Amino acid sequence: MTLDPEGLFRETVARLSGERLVEEALSRSGLVGPTRVIALGKAALGMTRGAARVLGEVSGVAATFISGAVPEGVRLLQGSHPIPDVASERAGRELLAEAAGAPAEEPLAFLISGGGSAIAASPARGITLADKVETTRALLHGGVPIEEINAVRKHLSALKGGHLGARARSARRYSFVLCDVPSGDLASVASGPTSGDPTTFAQCLGIVRDAALPLPERVQARLQAGARGEIDETPKPDDPRLEGIAHVLLAAPADLSRVASELAGERGERCAAHPLALRGSLDEWVERCVRFVRSGGRSNEATSWLALSGEPSLRIPAGAGRGGRMQHLALLLARELSGAPFVAMCAGSDGRDGDTPHAGAQADGETARRARGMNVDLDRAIARFDSATTCAALGVAVPAFDSGTNLCDLVLIRRG
């Protein structure tokens, strides 16, 4: 039976679930007995369940953006994503209180995954939640790399950039991290709540100026004051309050393409996996995919695959429709490779693509022809960044689901 791209995608994210990876890491750590857990991010629920399975008795909080079961003794906090709201602010206060209230003699395990920057928000002094909302929207729509977005977020927060870890008094502190940042920088995941922050106010001011983003006056004023040395910097990597926190990397974006390749190989199908997590513009991803499909020529070779993981950048204009990076990519591939023998699955590893009800979308050589037959204008949809509406109309959208992990985007293409 031919392996289909969506099936391979689902198997890949299941192999890299936060629950499974936390369970394996804790089993190797030697940490046993009653433990306080503070989980934050899109994969917080599964990671908390994995911890409870190994540790037996846990207490604490899990902050995420969906509802679900948590182990006995753990409180569920629900914030918003990708834009923070009042529930996110409430979750931020609860996380800080939980860290500060953990007894020094009790082990503490932080369980961190991407998405935490919006799910829990604790604005710095002089900054309002409305300021953070406006800033987040501007950064996300401005095509700014995630590491730079989170550098700015850290300097507007009382929780991120190491502040959460600095609050904890526990003598034994661990931080287990699912990394959704292409560079693999743990200090950028969820804006690094337990990691020392190597970035500065001056760097953040430069990021904002280079991107020419219109940010709230209070945000601009804080960054300028910080760059002048008038406001304390975020906790740095050598901050004594963060000494002793053992950081454990559970998985990174490049693991997505690696595992997908391994799973395809187990079924006797060849898969070329890019060894590094990719960045760059979405157009660069399109070019890479197009080259792969067209390099197949007229060969009758066995089915071959390409797996790419990472996070492409996409600058979204004002007045755009509703969509996500991966659905936009699927439409671009459908247009560029119309009539070619291929099928592609483009999706977010967390089971969601942007602020849409879809995980991503599939496209093949017939998608553009079907669009014409249905009077769907692909060019217009792409120009308006209205990919979610268009993918749903064409029947190529993949419904959102809780994958249990968060490791950037994954693109799988079968050629032939």
Image (cartoon, rainbow, N blue to C red):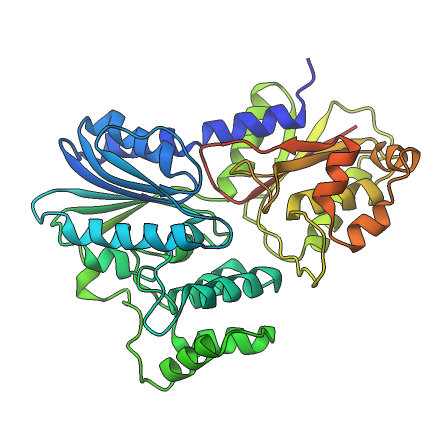
Question: Is residue 374 among what the camera can see?
Answer: yes
Residue drawn at x 58%, y 73% as measured from the top left: 213
* Residue depicted at x 41% and y 57%: 188
Percent x, y for residue 39?
A: 31, 42
Give the image location of residue 19, x and y in percent. Answer: 37, 30
Q: Where residue 353 sits in the image (x, y, percent)? A: 60, 42
Residue drawn where x is 69% and y is 17% of the image: 2
- Relative height, residue 4 to residue 189 (above, below): above
Query: Can I make out residue 295 in this image?
Result: no
Residue 111: give x, y in percent of width and height.
31, 42
Is 263 displayed left or right of 100 in the figure? right
Q: Quadrant of the N terminus?
A: top right
Q: Which residue occupies the foreground of this view, 345 or 381?
A: 381
In the image, taking residue 84 as reference, residue 329 lies left or right, namely: right
- Asked where in the image residue 222 lies, by quadrant, the reply is bottom left
Closer-to-camera residue (362/141) = 141
Q: Is residue 74 left or right of residue 78?
A: left
Residue shown at the point (31%, 74%) measured from the top left: 233
Q: Quadrant of residue 239?
A: bottom left
